[in-house]
Amino acid sequence: MALGATVIRLAIPDFPSLALAGLALSGLGAHWIRESIVRAHGQAVERKAIATLKVPPGWVATSNVMLNGGGDLDVLIVGTDDSGTPWRYAVEIKSFESAMLRRNLLTGSEAIVKIDGRALPPGVIRQTLAAAVEVQGTPVLWLPRASGQSFAMKCGVVVVPGNARALKKALRIPTSGLFG
């Protein structure tokens, strides 16, 4: 009998263990639900932004361009400017509602931060640059829900806050003459 009682006792954990396991699982579940909501919001912003994008005559916008390394480029915009110079823009769309450039005067490093000073996830710039390299285009990070002035980073990423009109305005001018 003693052996059977020991086996049963080992198979049924005590209440504190169950409570901790339940707490951990509910925390993971809440995290996954939050991530899912954030992802769905980002996808909705992306779909709406692409739907509102009307490129100038002579330009072509292709959405959801599949990349060799996996994933996709949100929009590839190809055209020529008034002087006949061809341009290719690799546009990644993000749902951030604020963005500004912060430069460290001592190190020369740059970061895009939200209005509250928190940095954007580091993968955003890497993703934009990698997609642009693959399609041989100028990297553009479009933030359709943000407001403010467009700016170019030292790494080559052009950040365009604002609606489709703001992006369209930025695309009509070669990158080298955009902001300075």
Image: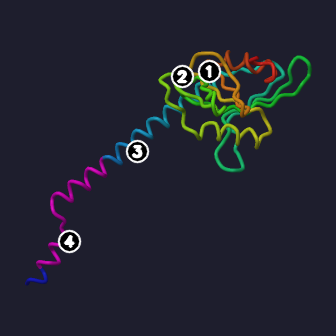
Taking 160 as reference, is 33 above or below it? below
Disc 4/disc 1 C-alpha distance (Å): 57 Å
Disc 3/disc 1 C-alpha distance (Å): 29 Å
Report the residue marked by disc 4.
11
Question: Is there CB contact under 8 Å for labels 2 and 1?
Answer: yes
Disc 2/disc 1 C-alpha distance (Å): 8 Å
Report the residue marked by disc 2.
98
Q: Residue farthest to the left?
A: 1
Q: Which mark is residue 32?
A: 3
Report the residue marked by disc 1.
161
- The quarter of the picture where the C terminus appears is top right
**Mark 2, secondary structure of its residue:** loop
Question: Reading the chain from its start, which is encountered first: label 4 or label 1?
Answer: 4
Question: Reading the chain from its start, which is encountered first: label 3 or label 4?
Answer: 4
Question: Reading the chain from its start, which is encountered first: label 2 or label 1?
Answer: 2
Q: Nearer the viewer, residue 18 or 114?
A: 114
